Amino acid sequence: SDGRMFPVTDNSQTIIDTITHAAIKAGVEVWTKSKVQSVEWIDSSDDNNNLDNGNFAINVSSRSATVAKEESKEYFDALILATGSFPIGHEIARSLGHKVIKPVPSLFTFDTKELVREGGTFHGLAGLSVQTARLTLTVSDEMKPPSADDLTEQQPPSNDEASKTKKKKRKKKAPAITQEGPLLITHHGISGPATLRLSAFAAREFHAVKYNCEVKLHFCPKFEEQQRRLGSTGGSEDILMDALWEMTRLIPKRRVATGCPLFMTESREENDDTSTNETPNAPIIPKRLWAALVSHSSISPDLVWGDASKAMIRSLANNLASFPLKTTGFSSFKEEFVTAGGIFLKEVQLTNMESKIRPGLFMAGEVLDVDGVTGGFNFMGCWSTGYIAGGSAAEFCSMVNSPE
């Protein structure tokens, strides 16, 4: 329902096998134990250069059972860079005159050491999930990404220019980056689509502060939306405060920590055959997580709703609507999927993925400054640009080698 796509086997090896089979079927020649060291551009405007072999000279080192290392130079009319986020691809692009936006991690999970350690609010809750949560990162001045020229390691602005930039930034209200979706508590912090989406849209902001910052977590944004449709007004905390305070009248003898009293009461739309993990009329927050949030709000586990003060309920409403989540890093072991950054897109003709600087040079996939959210979108981007680049490169070679 959220547009994500995975193979029916739920195994990434299926994708590898499919592409490998297609390459073999197409007659692709694969060189193993060979490494591209560098690429040289042969300028056609230089009369001293012989272009019979092609515009690109690729220096390759190879190894075999009999030869420790052998250097060779191969010539081609066209070259496709599809090296992903490996540094060699960006080095080649720079050597051929392209700008490269500095790559940073994207699609990662958050470490929250203070929350998951013993005594922390999330300690012992690994595996619990919330169907829909909202994560918000307020972008401070130190997080704001530099311009494209700065990202490509150009000369920094002068002191006067930097001063003007700072003055302009002070006049603007700090922007916020917000994402919603399922959220999962892990042994290290939080994960799930909401987390991964925020990491993608705020990859450079997190990198700028070395992944140490505060993210606000709203545990029940859909419930808030439901209450607004029913006539509630005010901010998120106010709406939840009103809903929770009503419990002091409806269930005064029930303990606050027993379980979440907030439910999604809306019925599904007619003819909606889609299935979700949400159980109709189930509490929006799992029982153990609710008890942890009640404790975090300084409410006694034995306190009943009828004895709760407005200050106590206000504290709980605040934690539900704007829980302070201090990130202390990101998980990189098998958790980081892609990078943000790569070859500057304004130097690429996107209709055929050809370089605007070097004719015959094509780019595809993550080597470009393109990244998407989780759910197969990055695969799709690689395959789509690869298909276009491959076809365009073949067309380019045919045109170069066609008799006049």
Image: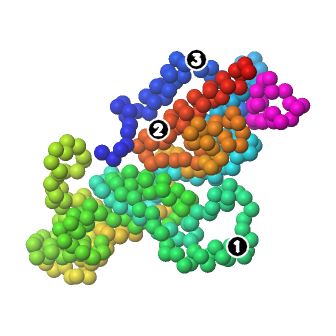
- Pick whichever of labels 3 and 2 is earlier in the sequence: 3
Does residue 55 show up magenta in the picture? yes
* Residue in the image at 23% along x and 59% along y: 284
Does residue 259 show up magenta in the picture? no
Does residue 121 lie above or below 95 as drawn? Answer: below
Furthest residue toward right = 48
The residues tagged by marks 3 and 2 sit, at their Cα atoms, a distance apart of 23 Å
Residue holding disc 2: 380
What's the amino acid at mark 3?
Gly
Callout 3 secondary element:
loop
Callout 2 secondary element:
helix
Furthest residue toward front = 404
**Residue 367 appears in the picture as rendered:** no
Does residue 11 lie above or below 357 as drawn? Answer: above
Does residue 202 lie above or below 138 as drawn? Answer: above
Indicate the colouring scheme: rainbow
| Residue 336 x, y percent position in the rendering | 50, 47
Residues drawn in magenta: 38-58
The foreground one among 297 and 73 is: 73
Q: How crowded is mark 2: few (under 14 residues within 10 Å), some or many (20 or more)?
A: some
What's the amino acid at mark 1?
Glu
**Residue 236 appears in the picture as rendered:** yes
The foreground one among 215 and 259 is: 215
| Residue 220 x, y percent position in the rendering | 28, 63
| Residue 173 x, y percent position in the rendering | 49, 75
Residue holding disc 3: 27
